[in-house]
Structure formats: C-alpha cells, structure tokens
Image (cartoon, rainbow, N blue to C red):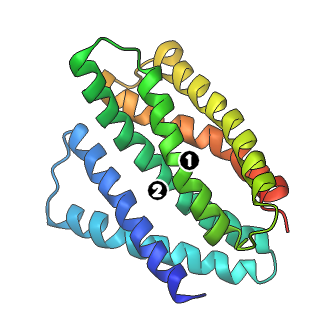
Amino acid sequence: MKLIDVILALVSGRIIAFLLQDLLKELGISSGFYVFLIVWLGFPLFSLFCLWISYLIGKKFLFVYQMAKFLLVGAVATIVDLKVFELFYWLISYFISVSLLFPKGISFLIATFLKYWGNKHWAFLKHEKENIKKEVTQFFFVTVIGMVIDIVAFYVFVNIVGPQYGVSETFWVKISVIFAGIVAAVWNFAGYKFWVFKK
C-alpha cells in the first residue's frame, strides 16, 4: 500500500466522520467524549484498516482493492453531494421557491467531477492521457445514466417511501441523498471499471 493510499483513507474516514456527527446531531444524540473518540478518531482508523484488508485481498483479486477505493471516493463524493445540495437548496430557496430536484441535480454534477478524478487517478490508476476524449465521453455517458438513477431513487425515497421510523422530514431528505448515491454507485462502479477505465 502506498503512502497516498494511507493519507486518502484517513482523509476519507475523517470526512465520513463529519457526516456521521451531523447525522447524530439530527437524531439528538449528544457528542460526548466517547462519541468524539469513535467518530473523529475511530472512523479514519477504521477506514484505513478496511483499505489495508482490501489491499491484502486485492493482491489476489484486484477488483476488491479497486472497489474499496471506489467506495471511499464515492463516500466522499456523496458527502460533497449532500453538503452542496444543502447549500444550493438554501441559497436558491432563499430567493425563489424551487423543487428539491434542481439543487439535487447541481450537487450530483459537482460531486461527479470529484468522482472522475478520484476514480481515474486513485481507484483504477489510469494515468494515461491517450483517448482522453473517448474516456470523458464514456464517463459522461455512464454518469448521466447514474444521475438519472440517483435522481429517480432520491424521488422515490423522498416522495413515495417518505420519512420512516419517526424521523424528521429534514433528516429523511439527508438520508435519501445517501440512499440515492448508493443505488447509483452500483451502476457507476460497473460502468467505470468495465468500460471507462478498463485497461
């Protein structure tokens, strides 16, 4: 495992911890000392540990290591998606009444730029620059389908399934962004690995 893998795993775990603390606040769970240790120290170390295990398995089955890095990139991109969604929704709704789908589309596209770089250069280690137009076109195609899957899944979770287990609507919208990202991630991993960044 390279030093960059260690650093990116720790940073990814830290970003995931940021989201977890946000969700715990939404649920009314106070962040005492032990929660602080688990969230702020435990998640980065757990992220690194999981990447190390996948690295060991990846010596025999490369796709496992690629999938672990893809999941870390995806987790960070999903958090960026959520925070950009919240920002754009707040900014736009402050001035005009707008559907949730518009800021969701914007946040998805911004997170996609992060996913492209992370997946190309870290998860799938494809640094070549030849056929860049073809690669970007393929990435765009997979991503647009992923965006449609993401937005449809988000719509289903928010408007058809609706808040579950007595959680607030605001909390459910945040969780729905994450659920939608997971659904789209299945499509994206297959498309990126077997078509866009195929070596």
The disc labelled 2 sits on which kind of residue? Val
Name the residue nearer the viewer: 50 or 177: 177
The answer to which quarter of the image holds residue 143 is: top right
In the rendered view, tell whether residue 164 sits above or below residue 142. above
Q: Quadrant of the N terminus?
A: bottom right
- Residue that label 1 marks: 112
- Circle 2 residues within 10 Å: few <14, some 14–19, many ≥20: many
Labelled pair 1, 2 in contact (Cβ < 8 Å): no
Whether residue 168 is visible here, answered yes or no, is: no
The disc labelled 1 sits on which kind of residue? Thr
- The residue sitting at 27% across, 52% down in the picture is 21
- Residue that label 2 marks: 76
Question: Residue 164: x and y, percent?
Answer: 42, 23
The answer to which quarter of the image holds residue 82 is: top left
Question: Residue 152: x and y, percent?
Answer: 60, 23
Q: In which quarter of the image is the C terminus?
A: bottom right
Whether residue 141 is visible here, answered yes or no, is: yes
- The residue sitting at 23% across, 17% down in the picture is 95
- Label 2 secondary element: helix
Q: Mark 1 and mark 2: span between their CA atoms?
A: 11 Å
Left or right of 126: which side holds 104? Answer: left
